[in-house]
Amino acid sequence: MIILLKLILAHFIGDFLLQPKSWVEDKELNKATSYKFYIHILLYGLLTFLVLWNIQYWSLVLTLMLIHAVIDIIKLYAQKETSKIKWFLIDQLLHIISILVIWKIWFNPILEISSWIENKNIWIYITALLFITSVTSIIIQVLMSNWSKLIDDNNNESLNNAGKYIGVLERLFVFIFVITGNWEAIGFLLAAKSVFRFGDLKESKDRKLTEYILIGTLLSFGIAIASGMVVLELIKSL
């Protein structure tokens, strides 16, 4: 396992810490003809070798370098200006998966996957997380659809889908606080959100908007708290 951590550490250092923004911009502009692309790949290989510090792993390092280069090339030619975020996430996911696969092939660790699949708590948490993110977002949207029509969005300067992501994040935080027993943190989170929202509500002077945000917040927090309590009870009873 320590070797896997070393490989991931080398990836983080090479892909983030030691890759300046100017290198990224040059790669996006010149793609495979960018000399900084090749410097990045060589640096990644050097870092991987340094963290492993064993000449016997030279073939592993070369394999990871090649796979890293292929993934980066695919990203550089596939991404568009409007899809950079999507391809950034895909790129990082593929890098991590490739490291896991190579680690598994080279060292053949015994992974107790079956025990994870049969673990009842894992399925409870997965179901709960899906519910408080995607499912709850739709539920709240439907429940508040009639009121949302009454809100004036003509002068809305909010970021696209910002409210949706804020709601998902706050429910995740509340859920974690509940299952870890940190109830006081929920009050802190609610207070912090109220402080940030106070200025907007004060300037808008719109009672409907205030009531709309209050109902949405209470719904979001309430569902997250209830979900956390249900999960705790299920874990105790099973």
Image (cartoon, rainbow, N blue to C red):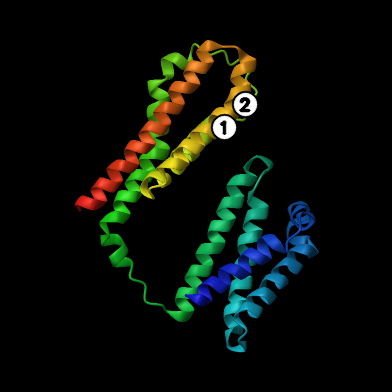
Q: Is residue 235 left or right of residue 210?
A: left
Q: Which residue lies furthest to the left in this view?
A: 237
**Are the two marked residues, 1 and 2, in contact with CB atoms closer than 8 angstroms?**
yes
Q: Mark 2 points at which residue?
A: 158
Q: In which quarter of the image is residue 200?
A: top right
Pinpoint residue 131: horizontal percent, then vertical percent.
36, 39
The amino acid at mark 2 is Ser
* Disc 2 secondary structure class: loop
Q: In which quarter of the image is residue 35?
A: bottom right
Pinpoint residue 135: horizontal percent, then vertical percent.
37, 35
Pick the front one: 179 or 7: 179
Q: Residue furthest front?
A: 184
Q: In which quarter of the image is residue 202?
A: top right
Q: Name the residue under label 1.
A: 162
Q: Residues within 10 Å of mark 2 (few under 14, many from 20)?
A: few
Q: In this view, does 109 lie to the left or right of 44?
A: left
The amino acid at mark 1 is Ala
Pick the front one: 183 or 129: 183
Q: Is residue 161 visible?
A: no
Pinpoint residue 115: horizontal percent, then vertical percent.
28, 66
Q: Is residue 197 visible?
A: yes
Q: Residues within 10 Å of mark 1 (few under 14, many from 20)?
A: few
* Disc 1 secondary structure class: helix
Image position of 173 with respect to 55: above or below:
above
